[in-house]
Image: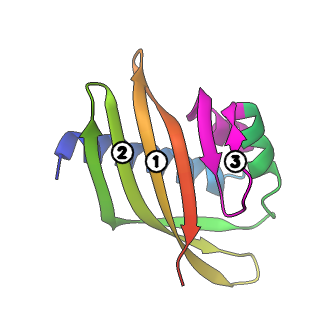
Amino acid sequence: MDSTARNIVGSLFDLWATAFNDEDPAAVAQLFSADALFQGLGPKVYIGPTEIQGYYERVPKGVRVKVDDRDLHARSVLSKGVAGFVRVLFIEASGGERTVSVSITAQQEGIRWMIKQYHASETR
């Protein structure tokens, strides 16, 4: 595995999980590029940080995530891009749990890595 890509992707998932667990949709949205494509667990595709922030504002209060970085896969793509996949445990306030596979692609923009594409799929 590409260790640089793994570090970048792992860091992005860590930032995402922290902002998610802090219930801070604006902080989550700041991880995404201006033209990011986002598909959560529903059929709608959201474009850009404003729409993505709106998606996270609708997440019920008390939901938490745990990223399983033991199952993190990452690769470099092109000269300034990375792609990665991880399993995430979503824990509802009621205690219910579901495992979701999440994949991202990210691109370096200046000194920051920005998520360009995000896709989630519930595993059964």
For residue 124, above or below residue 102? below
Q: Which of marks 1 and 2 is nearer the N terminus?
A: 2
Tag on residue 104? 1
Discs 1, 2 touching: Cβ within 8 Å: yes
Disc 1 residue type?
Answer: Ile
Q: How far apart are marks 3 and 2 (CA)?
A: 19 Å
For residue 37, above or below residue 67? above
Disc 2 residue type?
Answer: Ala
Q: Quadrant of the C terminus?
A: bottom right
Q: Distance between the residues labelled 3 and 1?
A: 14 Å
Q: Nearer the viewer, residue 109 or 95?
A: 109
Q: Which of marks 3 and 2 is nearer the N terminus?
A: 3
Tag on residue 83? 2
Q: Nearer the viewer, residue 12 or 81?
A: 81
Q: Is residue 97 left or right of residue 107?
A: right
Locate residue 116, reporting x and y percent: 51, 35
Is residue 104 on the magenta stretch? no
Q: Distance between the residues labelled 1 and 2?
A: 6 Å
State the residue at coordinates (77%, 49%): 55
Crowding near pointer 1: few (<14 within 10 Å), some, many (20+)?
Answer: many
Q: Find residue 111 and report its image quarter.
A: top left
Locate residue 103, reporting x and y percent: 46, 55
Q: Which of marks 3 and 1 is nearer the N terminus?
A: 3
Which secondary structure lies at badge 1? strand
Q: Find residue 61 and report its image quarter.
A: bottom right
> What's the magenta region?
24-49
Residue at mark 3: 45
Q: Is residue 85 left or right of residue 53?
A: left
Q: Which tag is nearer the camera, tag 3 or tag 2? A: 3
Crowding near pointer 2: few (<14 within 10 Å), some, many (20+)?
Answer: many
